[in-house]
C-alpha cells in the first residue's frame, strides 16, 4: 500500500521576482501559506529575501497578538536550512524580537519548547518528507499549535507592504542567541515515565531489539540520546545529518532499508522517520508495515483500556482505511474523519475534546503527552505498549484488523491551476462518479491535489483488489490524458 503525504489543496503561490515581493494592496495578496506552512523549491519560490520578509512581517503581526517574548527557531539537515534560518532571524530581530536558535532538531522540539518556555512563536525550517531541494517554514503559536489561518493571512498581507513607508520600523533591534542546549529539555520530556499508570520501570524497553531509520534528517543525532536510556538494543540507519540525502531512498517515504535491517538483525520492530521527525512508520519483526492506522488502533486500544480515551473517539482523515474504521467501530469506538493534514486533525480533536488522532502517513497526536505530532514520542510509546502487552508486535498486528486494498497513484501536473482546479475537468469528474457507483459501499475514491508538490493524488479503496486496480488505472489514464497532455476540458 502506498501512503499519502499529509497535504491538501492550498491557494496559488505568490509570483516572485528574484525572490522579492513587490508592494501591493493587502487584499490582493494570495496566501503564501499552504496546509503545513510555507513550502517550495529553494531558489525558485523559497528564497532568502522571502524568508527575511517573512521573519519581519511575522514579527510585526505576532507582537500585536501575543506578549513580547523570544522566537524559537529550529531546522532540519537540508543544505538550505542555515541560509533560511539566518534570513528569518534577521527579519525577526529587525522587527524587534529576540531569537533563540535551537539548531538541528525535530519539529516537535520546536513546538514543545515554544509552549513550555512561553515563546511568542516557534518556527521550524523544514520541508518534512519532501526531497532535499525543497524546504519550508512552519509556524507555531505560543500554545504549540500551528499558526491560525487568520494570522497567516495577516502575515501575508504585511509582507506585501514591507517596502511601503507606512510599515512601522522598530526603534530597537532584537538579539540573536544560539540555544542548542534547550534540546535536552525536549529529550527529557520524552523520557518521562511512559504509560506511568501501567507501572513502567526505568528501563521500559530492556531486552528489545529496535532498528531506527533516521532519514539523514532532523533526528539523525537523537536516536541514541532518546532510545539509548530505555534499555533497548539499537541498530541505527542513516543516523548522520546529510542535507544532500535527507529522505532519499530512506525514512518513512521508503521503508525497504528498514524492513531489510529488521529481518537481518532479527529485531522486534523498526521505526522510520521523515526529515523533520514529526511522523513515523513502523514495521514488525517480519517487516510488515505498521502505518498510522495501525498505530492509532493499537494506541487507541491501550488508552481505551486505561480509561483515557474520551467517548472512545479517534480522529483521523479521509485517508484512513475502511478496515481500520470497521474494526474500531466493532470495539465500540468512534472514528471521526477530517481533511488531510495534521492541523485539521488537531483542530477537530480540540473541538471534540478528543485525545488521540492522526494520519495514515504517520502523524500521530496524543494530547495526553504532546502538543504536536511527534515521531520520536510515538515510537517510544508504541514500543512500550508492545513491551507491556507481553506479546510481539507481530502478534498485535495479526490480531488487529485487515486493511481493505488501498491504492494511491500520483499524477504529476506542473500546471498549478489545472492541478488545483481538477474538479473543472468534466471527463475526470464523470469517471470518478462511475467508479463510486461501481464500488458502492464496499469501496471509495479520493482525489486531491497536493499542497506542496505538483501532484494530483488518486486513491481507490475496495474490498476486492482487482476493483481497486481497475479503477485506479482508469482514473490515472483520464487524469493524464486530460490534465497533463491535452487542454483541460470544460
Image (tube, rainbow, N blue to C red):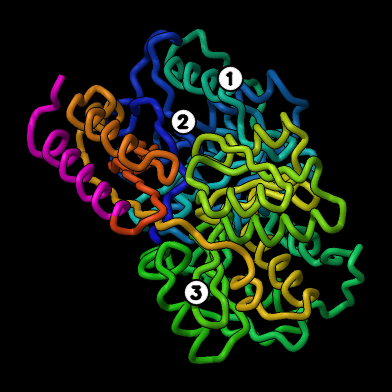
Residue 393, percent from left and from top: 64, 76
Please rate how many residues cluster around mark 1, counting C-alpha atoms within 10 Å: few if below 14, some from 14 to 19, many from 20: few
Mark 1 to mark 2 CA distance (whole Å): 11 Å
Depth check: give the residue in front, 289 or 178. 289
Task: Decide whether residue 173 is among the magenta residues.
Answer: no
Depth check: give the residue in front, 479 or 11. 479
In the image, is 475 to the left or to the right of 26? left
Task: Decide whether residue 489 is among the magenta residues.
Answer: yes
Q: Which mark is residue 33?
A: 2
**For mark 3, what is the residue?**
288
- Would you identify the image quadrant in which residue 79 lies? bottom left
- Would you identify the image quadrant in which residue 294 lies? bottom right
Residue 452, percent from left and from top: 38, 41
Residue at the location (52% across, 13% down)? Answer: 167
In the image, is 5 to the left or to the right of 301? left
Residue 39, percent from left and from top: 42, 41
Mark nearer the N terminus (1 vs 3): 1
Q: Secondary structure at mark 3?
A: loop
Magenta range: 467-490
Please rate how many residues cluster around mark 2, counting C-alpha atoms within 10 Å: few if below 14, some from 14 to 19, many from 20: many
Image marks 1 and 3: residues in contact by CB distance under 8 Å: no
- For residue 113, say whether it is visible: no
Please rate how many residues cluster around mark 3, counting C-alpha atoms within 10 Å: few if below 14, some from 14 to 19, many from 20: some
Residue at the location (54% across, 91% down)? Answer: 265
The quarter of the picture where the N terminus appears is: bottom left
**For mark 1, what is the residue?**
150
Amino acid at each position: 500500500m502506498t501512503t499519502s503525504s499529509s497535504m491538501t489543496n492550498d491557494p496559488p503561490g505568490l509570483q516572485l521576482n528574484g525572490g522579492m515581493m513587490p508592494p501591493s494592496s493587502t487584499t490582493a495578496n494570495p496566501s503564501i501559506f499552504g496546509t503545513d506552512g510555507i513550502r517550495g523549491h529553494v531558489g525558485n519560490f523559497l528564497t532568502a529575501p522571502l524568508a527575511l520578509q517573512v521573519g519581519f512581517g511575522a514579527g510585526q503581526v505576532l507582537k500585536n497578538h501575543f506578549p513580547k517574548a523570544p522566537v524559537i527557531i529550529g531546522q532540519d539537515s537540508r543544505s538550505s536550512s542555515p541560509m533560511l534560518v539566518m534570513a528569518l532571524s534577521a527579519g525577526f530581530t529587525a522587527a524587534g524580537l529576540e531569537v533563540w536558535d535551537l539548531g538541528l532538531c525535530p519539529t516537535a522540539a520546536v513546538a514543545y519548547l515554544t509552549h513550555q518556555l512561553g515563546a511568542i512563536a516557534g518556527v521550524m525550517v523544514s520541508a518534512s518528507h519532501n526531497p532535499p531541494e525543497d524546504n519550508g517554514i512552519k509556524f507555531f503559536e505560543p500554545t504549540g499549535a500551528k499558526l491560525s489561518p487568520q494570522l497567516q493571512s495577516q502575515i501575508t498581507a504585511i509582507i506585501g507592504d514591507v517596502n511601503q513607508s507606512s510599515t512601522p520600523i522598530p526603534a530597537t533591534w532584537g538579539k540573536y542567541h544560539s540555544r542548542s542546549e534547550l534540546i535536552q529539555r525536549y529529550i527529557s520530556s520524552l523520557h518521562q515515565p511512559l504509560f506511568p499508570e501501567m507501572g513502567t520501570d526505568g528501563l521500559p524497553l530492556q531486552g528489545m531489539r529496535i532498528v531506527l531509520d533516521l532519514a539523514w534528517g532532523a533526528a539523525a543525532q537523537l536516536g541514541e540520546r532518546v532510545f539509548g536510556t530505555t534499555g533497548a538494543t539499537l541498530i541505527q540507519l542513516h543516523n548522520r545529518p546529510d542535507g544532500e540525502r535527507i529522505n532519499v531512498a530512506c525514512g518513512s517515504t521508503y521503508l525497504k532499508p528498514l524492513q531489510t535491517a529488521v529481518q537481518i538483525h532479527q529485531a522486534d520492530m523498526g521505526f522510520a522517520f521523515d526529515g523533520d521527525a514529526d511522523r513515523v512508520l513502523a514495521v514488525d519483526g517480519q517487516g510488515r508495515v505498521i502505518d498510522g492506522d495501525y498505530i492509532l488502533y493499537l494506541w487507541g486500544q491501550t488508552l481505551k483500556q486505561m480509561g483515557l480515551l474520551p467517548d472512545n473517539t479517534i480522529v483521523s482523515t479521509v485517508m484512513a482505511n475502511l478496515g481500520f474504521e470497521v474494526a474500531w467501530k466493532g470495539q465500540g469506538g468512534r472514528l471521526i474523519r477530517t481533511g488531510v493534514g495534521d492541523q485539521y486533525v488537531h483542530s477537530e480533536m480540540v473541538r471534540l475534546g478528543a485525545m488521540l488522532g492522526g494520519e495514515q502517513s504517520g502523524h500521530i497526536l496524543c494530547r495526553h503527552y504532546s502538543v504536536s505530532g511527534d515521531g520520536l514520542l510515538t515510537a517510544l510509546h508504541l514500543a512500550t505498549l508492545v513491551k507491556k502487552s507481553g506479546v510481539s508486535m507481530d502478534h498485535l498486528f495479526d490480531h488487529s484488523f485487515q486493511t481493505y486494498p488501498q491504492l494511491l497513484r500520483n499524477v504529476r501536473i506542473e500546471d498549478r491551476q489545472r492541478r488545483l482546479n481538477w474538479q473543472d475537468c468534466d471527463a475526470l469528474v464523470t469517471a470518478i462518479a462511475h467508479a463510486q457507483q461501481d464500488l458502492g459501499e464496499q469501496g471509495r475514491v479520493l482525489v486531491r491535489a497536493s499542497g506542496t508538490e505538483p501532484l494530483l493524488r488518486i486513491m481507490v479503496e475496495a474490498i476486492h483488489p482487482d476493483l481497486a486496480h481497475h479503477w485506479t488505472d482508469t482514473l490515472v489514464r483520464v487524469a493524464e490524458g486530460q490534465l497533463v497532455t491535452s487542454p483541460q476540458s470544460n
